[in-house]
């Protein structure tokens, strides 16, 4: 049995950096060489407009964030299958408000991929992998990020609570959304 570290805690039988693929997307472990192509997506200020780190489009702000994502060992680069171009990233993590859980977050996609099937396809791949290990997945969203709230609700997730939480080393007010496997199966 392999054991994987998830934000410093051990969780049996869960690989936080799998390679997942369907017809249009490839999700693969984030690598050091992904800095430039991922920054090409992240340098658009609109990507961060609904996020607490609104200045993450600046290289000097993005690079330390990228280093954190890379060091986490649980971040996936999101790529088109046609040309392997990186169009964003997402991450598995264990949230402090739900010990031994699996959460999906730290997600961003290039604007060209908003409003279509990309987020749903990416989350479908990630959820299927997570549901092999748990029955519930959590997502945490800034209360001001209406776009992410709408996308998360479309997945079938429900808002459980809003309150103070430390994520990514920063304390703030976050919404906790729950998506149970049986609900997902019906969507």
Image (tube, rainbow, N blue to C red):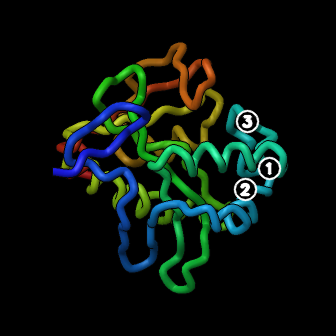
Pointer 2 residue: 42
Neighbourhood count class around disc 2 (C-alpha, 10 Å): few under 14, some 14–19, many 20 upward: many
Q: Which mark is residue 137?
A: none
How far apart are labels 1 and 2 at the CA level?
5 Å
Which residue shows up at 41% across the image and 28% down it? 95
Where residue 24 sits, quadrant-wise, is: bottom left
How far apart are labels 2 and 3 at the CA level?
12 Å
Pointer 3 residue: 53
Which residue shows up at 28% across the image and 29% down it? 100
Which residue shows up at 49% across the image and 52% down it? 75
Classify 142 as above or below 107. above
Residues 28 and 49: in front is: 28
Residue 131, visible in the rendered structure = no
Q: Is residue 59 left or right of residue 17?
A: right
Q: Is residue 47 left or right of residue 74?
A: right
Residues 145 and 105: in front is: 105
């Amino acid at each position: 049995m392999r054991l994987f570290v998830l934000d410093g805690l051990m969780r049996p039988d869960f690989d936080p950096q799998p390679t997942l693929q369907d017809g249009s997307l490839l999700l693969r472990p984030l690598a050091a060489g992904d800095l430039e192509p991922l920054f090409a997506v992240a340098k658009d200020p609109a990507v961060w407009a609904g996020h607490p780190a609104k200045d993450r489009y600046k290289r000097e702000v993005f690079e330390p964030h990228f280093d954190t994502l890379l060091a986490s060992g649980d971040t996936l680069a999101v790529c088109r299958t046609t040309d392997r171009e990186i169009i964003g990233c997402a991450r598995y993590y264990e949230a402090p408000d739900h010990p031994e859980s699996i959460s999906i977050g730290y997600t961003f996609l290039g604007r060209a991929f908003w409003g279509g099937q990309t987020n749903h396809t990416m989350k479908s791949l990630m959820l299927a992998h997570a549901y092999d290990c748990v029955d519930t997945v959590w997502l945490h969203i800034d209360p001001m990020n209406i776009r992410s709230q709408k996308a998360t609700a479309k997945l079938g997730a429900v808002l459980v609570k809003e309150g103070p939480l430390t994520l990514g080393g920063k304390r703030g007010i976050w919404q906790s959304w729950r998506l149970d496997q049986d609900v997902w199966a019906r969507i």
